Amino acid sequence: MKAAVRDRYGPPEIVRVEDVDMPVPAGDQALVRVEAASVNRADLDGLGPRPAFARLIIGIRAPRNHAVGIDVAGVVESIGPAVTRFKPGDRVFGDMFSFGAGAFAEYTCAPERAFQLIPDGMSFEDAATLPHSAILALQSLRLRKGRTIEPGSHVLIDGASGNVGPFAVQIAKAMGAEVTGVCRTEKVEFVRSLGADHVIDYTAVDYTRTGERYDWIVDTDSHHSLLAVRHALRPGGVYVTLGGTGLPILGALLLGPVISRAAGKPMGLLIWWRPFNAAPDDVGRLKDLIAAGKVRPVIDRRFPLSQIVEALRYVDDGKPKGKVLIITT
Ligand SMILES: NC(=O)c1ccc[n+]([C@@H]2O[C@H](COP(=O)([O-])OP(=O)(O)OC[C@H]3O[C@@H](n4cnc5c(N)ncnc54)[C@H](OP(=O)(O)O)[C@@H]3O)[C@@H](O)[C@H]2O)c1
């Protein structure tokens, strides 16, 4: 079978498509024929790697795991003897982040707990957009202890035009918030089309300096320091950042608790992430939001697996307005 692989760190161009052995599902594993996969910032972060200190976990000189791709939707091809939830022919989707990646391939294999059934009526393409980014969006609007946004909350999504942002905008709107999205000039209309009440073009305006105050700020990539964001929060307001480069992540991790206490505002890195496979309630909630038409996956472009480098490059260059898919069939 064909699969995207990499054996060193670097930009998208280090990825290549190769013939590899077809996995044979053992024990509780399911082999899935991939119909669609989607690209996430986490895929590019894994290539870099970003942050650099991720090498301590995934391999100091070179990545130990050569597989690429986390978001997947497809059909169960065969199952190991201990599988109880699925049978061949079932339509499933999942996030392979915790299972060794491998979504950018003709087939992928993981323990059955990695997957959930795709709801009737949902396409493989829509399903492939959801597992990583939509779950992160949902959880970025909720603190570990359950505090979340309320109807009428003023919510700002910094990075509203990427993978997580469009889901966060739509989920916050569905929860009754007044939503401001932040993005570059070319994507202002796209973010408005997601339902954002206000859109700020970050190339012209720094939202931390406008005098506006928000109840909840989600930053998909640590675009401002905690000290700057503090002034854009209402009393008791919340700031959640999802990722970024090394220093902002370390700052959010180490300084977050200190600044939060001093300012009386919870601020810091989202460290309560429960991925798709560990968050069945959130997956159920997403399915409901989509069935009710309140959240709509937006697909910017589809690439065949053979053009995986072009797809990753397109996302890395910040061009998409919505999700980018890898189509394998
Ligand atoms: N915390 C956790 O447990 C956890 C788990 C998994 C993943 N993650 C992380 O979550 C993040 C998810 O990000 P994503 O996939 O949504 O990223 P993305 O698609 O790359 O989106 C990045 C966004 O940042 C915006 N942006 C770029 N420069 C900006 C600036 N100077 N000011 C304001 N906005 C700017 C982009 O806007 P334009 O395109 O309009 O320029 C884009 O909307 C990744 O960092 C990933 O590693 C976190």
Image: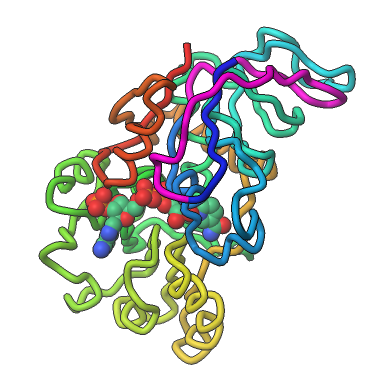
Q: Is 264 situated above or below 237?
A: below
The image position of residue 113, as x and y in percent, is 74, 33
Q: State the image quarter where residue 279 is shown.
A: top right
Residue 29 in magenta? yes
Residue extent of the magenta highlight: 10-37
Say which residue appears at 49% left-offset and 63% top-offset.
51
Q: Quadrant of the N terminus?
A: top right
Closer to us: 6 or 310: 6
Residue 298 in percent (x, y) is at: 33, 32
Magenta stretch: includes residue 171: no
Residue ranking furthest to the bottom: 262
Residue at 38% across, 44% down: 163
Residue shown at 37% from the left, 38% from the top: 312
Q: Which image quarter: residue 238?
A: bottom left
Front residue of 24/36: it is 24
Taking the image in four quarters, ligand 1 sits in the one at bottom left
